[in-house]
Amino acid sequence: MDLSRFPRRRYSHAPTPIERLPHFTAALAAQCPAGHRPEIWIKRDDMLGLFPGGNKTRKLEFLVADALAQGADTLVTCGAPQSNHCRITLSAAVKEGLRCRFVIEERVPHSFREDASGNHFLFRLMGVESMRVVPAGTDMAAEMQREVEALAGEGRKGYAIPGGGSNAIGGLGYVACVQELMAQSLDMGVRFDHVIVGSGSSGTHGGMLAGFVGHRYDATLTGIGVSRDPQDQVPLVLKEAQAVHDLLGTGVQVPVEAVRCVGGYWQPKYSVPNARMVEATQWLARTEGVILDPVYTGKIMAGLIGLAREGHFRDGEQVLFMHTGGLPGVFAYERELLGQVEMAP
Ligand SMILES: *Cc1c(COP(=O)(O)O)cnc(C)c1O
């Protein structure tokens, strides 16, 4: 899969590290059935550029390059009140000398607060041009189009980036990640049996799946849903992976059987903390000093832990957890992460 004919900006200096998690692996093994004790590794996509980066940085390398190629002067995007994607898009805009506007979807009623910390604080610190808040269920593509039209009325040129940066162009970032992972695997002499990744707007899971299928990489890719159960998530991931192949013109049909999604761990609702997320986040912090986030990676790691406890992995299998970022989120959920708030299991 040749990505070189697509324009790309570079926001990170090196491949993100792949590290062993020895203390966590030992603690987890003690809770797994005999014969089902895997070794756990982590790929540090929380250390991508546009600090503190995360998975959106990889997608934006291709999306922003496309915006620049089209002569845009303003990036328009959308997300939740604590959106990592909005923060990283703004960061890319600042770095490129572009302006940036958000449409914020209040998925949880009254969750937008002018004085909020975390990503919201960083929106203000990095000087977002505007944030328009709309209620849950709003047609975000139509709202972003309105912003682009308003900009055109002022003689400016906006470029709309869909939620999470998840379209065919954004997905190229995670094809590139698969190529990086394959090179690292070869260098390190480690063969991964499983890769565990978050599955939300699906550019990450779908982009990786496109790469796995296109390169015949034979590890098992499993997406842990952060906002949907498999019946709703599988079609999104399949659509994204296929869109990436269509853009690349490979002629590959991505088979639906290749899409593996796990549900449940995101409950009771997208972005609302649960006890399993808190357990996973405290566990990683206290065994490895690795900080997960409450909205995504804490729930995704809870999924990995749950699968391991059920005996899903076998002795000697190498399991790679994709740390997709989200660090600022911890500062918006401090009491929850310290276990000082009642919450759903
Ligand atoms: C956006 C995000 C995800 C989910 O990635 P998608 O490409 O939207 O599926 C996972 N982890 C973090 C930290 C994110 O910000």
Image (tube, rainbow, N blue to C red):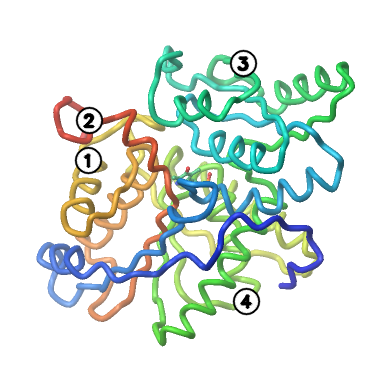
Task: Verify CB contact (< 8 Å) between mark 3 and mark 4.
Answer: no
Q: CA distance from mark 1 to mark 2?
A: 7 Å
Query: Identity of the amino acid at label 1?
Result: Val
- Image-based side of 34 in relation to 171, left or right: left
* Pointer 1 with pointer 2, Cβ within 8 A: yes
Q: Which residue is located at x 39 percent, y 83 percent? A: 190
Q: Quadrant of residue 338?
A: top left
* Quadrant of the rendering where the N terminus is positioned: bottom right
> Which amino acid lies under the numbered mark 2 shown in the image of this protein?
Glu
Q: Are marks 1 and 4 in contact (CB under 8 Å)?
A: no
Question: Depth check: 117 or 319 in front?
Answer: 117
Residue under the image location 25 percent in, 56 percent down = 305
Q: Earlier in the sequence, mark 3 or mark 4?
A: 3
Decide: few, some or many residues near mark 3? Use Cα within 10 Å; few <14, some 14-19, many ≥20. few
Left or right: residue 323 compared with residue 287 = right
Circle 4 packing at 10 Å, graded few (<14), some (14-19), many (20+), is: some
Q: In this figure, which residue is indicated by the disc labeled 4?
A: 215
The x and y percentages for residue 207 are 60, 58
Question: Where does the image place residue 103, in percent across and percent down from the top left?
Answer: 62, 22
Helix, strand or loop at label 4? It is loop
- Residue that carries the numbered disc 3 in the rendered image: 132
Horizontally, residue 211 falls left or right of residue 136, namely right
Mark 1 Cα-neighbour bin, 10 Å: few <14, some 14–19, many ≥20:
many
> Marks 1 and 4, Cα distance to the nearest angstrom?
36 Å
The residue type indicated by label 3 comes to Arg
Circle 2 packing at 10 Å, graded few (<14), some (14-19), many (20+), is: some
Q: Residue at x 79, y 33 (%)?
A: 73
User: Where residue 133 appears, x then y in whole percent?
Assistant: 57, 15
Q: Which residue is mark 1?
A: 278
